């Protein structure tokens, strides 16, 4: 729990997750996990060894993208430079992975850190320092999630309303293009129109929409699923019209989505997840196309709802209608291109093919 209301996610329950297992579907498909975290928080520890264990649970995860979560920020020195500690931390994990100490997955092959864009032009030295800290540094994430409902208030990462349209923020945002950096956007579905406006103002900056734009299903949105879906879809289509925006397919396992899988006596199967989440995933891929869409685990937040193996089985079920090339884009190609990842497939790798339809 966080002050001001329920957390956006709940800590994972290992024994509960272990009570359901299923065969790995299409283990030949190569996966780049486009979004995960590593952290140490009260009641939730998820570090490199934990992610490595999940990534080696049967699917062919060849690489991953680490995304800012306020881990290992520097505790001293100028406030603006404190996020640099997280980039250094993620790069150390990547080096450990490159030495083969964390299995076969290229963990943290791409690193998305943080820099305070409200600094305006003064953020440029921070971005340059992060670039110098790691050759894997690809961009920043700036939390822009704001809502009037206290259910969604997170004092530690408070965001004022309308932040992405603020002139000082946009002055800092303008620094990204010249440095070749991307912008990961974490916001709620109620703010998608603002993101579309930002994308139109900066058409040459790569923007990555996190978690499908975060449709909500708790707080004031509980029991309003159809209404939220319609409003979310409308905002999503506006963002998708901007060619410089790509999207991450995931995040629906967070408790903020309101599906309440974490409250069930038994974990969901991949069929359960595909049936429940399918309309959101299908709508998003239809809007952006496979070449601008990428699957993400969003672990550990989504681990409150299902295991890593079951999650990717569900994604593979939802990818059944797509062609060989489209499957490759969804599971590895888009993430590799957007984050310019340097990945080499393991020896004897089999290219991803179309996902066969499961027997009815």
Image (cartoon, helix red, strand yellow):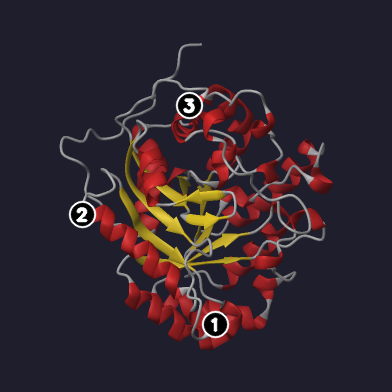
**For mark 1, what is the residue?**
79
Secondary element at tag 3:
helix
| Residue 46 visible in the shown view | yes
Image position, residue 242 (x, y; %) = 56, 59
178 relative to 149 in the view: left or right: left
Between disc 2 and disc 3, the foreground one is: 2
Alpha carbon distance from label 1 to label 2: 33 Å
Residue at left offset 49%, top offset 71%: 73
Residue 194 position by quadrant: bottom right
Residue at mark 3 to residue at mark 1: CA–CA distance: 45 Å
Say which residue appears at 44% left-offset and 19% top-offset: 357
Above or below residue 17? Residue 44 is below
- Residue under numbered circle 3: 317
Q: Earlier in the sequence, mark 1 or mark 2?
A: 1
Q: Callout 2: 10 Å neighbours few (<14), some, many (20+)?
A: few
Task: Check residue 99 in the rendering and tell me which mark sits there, or answer none.
Answer: 2
Is disc 1 placed on a helix, strand or loop?
helix
- Work out whether residue 139 or residue 234 is closer to the camera in this orientation and state it: 139
Give the residue furthest to the left: 347
Residue 126, image quadrant: bottom left
Q: Which of marks 2 and 3 is nearer the N terminus?
A: 2
Asked if labels 2 and 1 touch by Cβ distance under 8 angstroms, the answer is: no
């Amino acid at each position: 729990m966080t002050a001001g209301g329920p957390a956006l996610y709940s800590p994972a329950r290992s024994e509960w997750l272990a009570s359901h297992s299923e065969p790995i579907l299409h283990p030949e498909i190569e996966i780049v996990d486009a979004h995960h975290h590593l952290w140490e928080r009260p009641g939730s520890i998820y570090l490199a060894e934990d992610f490595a264990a999940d990534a080696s649970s049967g699917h062919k995860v060849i690489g991953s993208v680490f995304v800012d979560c306020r881990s290992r920020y520097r505790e001293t020195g100028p406030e603006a430079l404190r996020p640099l500690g997280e980039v250094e931390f993620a790069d150390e994990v990547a080096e450990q992975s490159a030495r083969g100490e964390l299995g076969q997955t290229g963990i943290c092959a791409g690193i998305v850190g943080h820099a305070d864009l409200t600094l305006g032009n003064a953020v440029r030295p921070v971005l340059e320092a992060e670039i110098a800290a790691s050759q894997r540094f690809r961009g920043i994430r700036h939390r822009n999630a704001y809502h009037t409902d206290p259910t969604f208030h997170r004092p530690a990462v408070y965001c004022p309303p309308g932040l992405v349209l603020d002139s000082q923020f946009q002055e800092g945002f303008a620094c990204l293009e010249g440095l070749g950096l991307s912008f990961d956007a974490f916001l709620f579905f109620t703010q998608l129109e603002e993101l579309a406006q930002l994308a139109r103002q900066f058409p040459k900056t790569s923007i990555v929409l996190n978690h499908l734009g975060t449709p909500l299903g708790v707080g004031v949105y509980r029991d309003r699923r159809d209404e939220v879906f319609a409003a979310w879809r409308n905002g999503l289509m506006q963002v998708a019209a901007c060619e410089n925006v790509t999207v991450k397919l995931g995040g629906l396992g967070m408790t903020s989505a309101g599906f309440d899988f974490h409250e069930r006596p038994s974990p969901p199967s991949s069929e359960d997840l595909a049936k429940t989440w399918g309309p959101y995933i299908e709508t998003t891929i239809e809007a952006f196309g496979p070449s601008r869409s990428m699957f993400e685990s969003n672990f550990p937040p989504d681990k409150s709802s299902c295991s890593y193996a079951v999650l990717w089985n569900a994604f593979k079920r939802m990818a059944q209608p797509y062609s060989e090339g489209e499957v490759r884009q969804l599971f590895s190609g888009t993430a590799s291109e957007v984050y310019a990842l340097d990945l080499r497939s393991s020896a004897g790798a089999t290219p991803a093919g179309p996902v066969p339809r499961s027997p009815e």
